[in-house]
Amino acid sequence: MKVLTLKTGYMAANAYIVYTENKPEAVIIDPGDDIELIMDLIKEHELKLEKILLTHGHFDHIGAVKDLKERTGAQVAIHKQEADFLTDPNKNLSYIINRQIVQDPADIFLEDGDLIRVADMEFKVLHTPGHTEGGVCYKLGKVLFTGDTLFEGSVGRTDLSGGSYEQLMSSIREKLLVLDDDHLVYPGHGRQTTIGRERRENPFLA
Ligand SMILES: [Zn+2]
Ligand SMILES: [Zn+2]
């Protein structure tokens, strides 16, 4: 499996393009808002984007969704409780940057435990509410894409609309910390880490 990491936008949100060797089909987790950078990487690696998987609907993760869908034909997936974030600037908080980010509605409405298959890859949906009510992480083998749920040395903020610190902590404990130490974590902001490292060193999980 290959993961291309790119940082996009004002909040330096991480976008991840995921594919396997010798197969063109690819997925992007949280495209952020730099459509040209994403399209350049897709062309450079001769990929065919099949799915746009969203960990949640905040503005810093969704800016390129509509353009990317138009230019690649990829389907957009988001948790069913988060669906209106794509179309409602008050929910996706884009007013914070004085913009009205409005995307098309999603194609796939996710629930906990759903499996998304692309080429040889199978992404399992882990519903992890707390940062937002419909926040999810995606698990692909021993790789986790955690959005704004878990970061290196930190956890997602819970003071925004729909946030709950208690819910976030139980999501992390019940869905993420039950996994073995060697699971790789690709967060929505900041550097890559592992479940083992966060279990030992993350001050919020002590
Ligand atoms: Zn967020
Ligand atoms: Zn974010």
Image: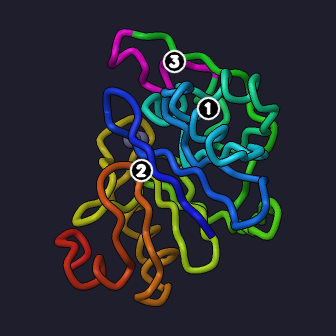
Relative to 189, is 179 on the left or the right?
right
The earlier-in-sequence mark between 2 and 1 is: 1
Whether residue 45 is situated above or below residue 99 in the rendered picture? below
Looking at the rendered structure, the kind of residue marked 3 is Pro
Judging by the rendered image, the residue that carries numbered circle 2 is 188
The earlier-in-sequence mark between 2 and 3 is: 3
Instruction: Check if mark 1's residue and mark 3's residue have beta carbons within 8 Å.
Output: no
Q: Secondary structure at mark 3?
A: helix
Judging by the rendered image, the residue that carries numbered circle 3 is 89
Judging by the rendered image, the residue that carries numbered circle 1 is 39
Residue at 62%, 57% (x, y): give it: 18
Asked if one can make out residue 134 in the rendered structure from this viewpoint, the answer is: no
Classify 10 Å Cα crowding around label 2: few (below 14), some (14-19), many (20 and above). many
Q: Quadrant of the C terminus?
A: bottom left
Q: Nearer the viewer, mark 2 or mark 1?
A: 1
Residue at 22%, 66% (x, y): give it: 153
| Tag of residue 113 | none
Q: Nearer the viewer, residue 86 or 35?
A: 35
Segment colored magenta: 87-98
Which quadrant of the figure has residue 165? bottom left
Q: CA distance from mark 1 to mark 3?
A: 25 Å
Q: Residue 110 at what x, y percent from top left?
A: 73, 52
Q: Nearer the viewer, residue 95 or 41?
A: 41
Classify 10 Å Cα crowding around label 3: few (below 14), some (14-19), many (20 and above). some
Looking at the rendered structure, the kind of residue marked 2 is Gly
Q: Identify the image's colour scheme: rainbow, by chain, secondary structure or one colour.
A: rainbow
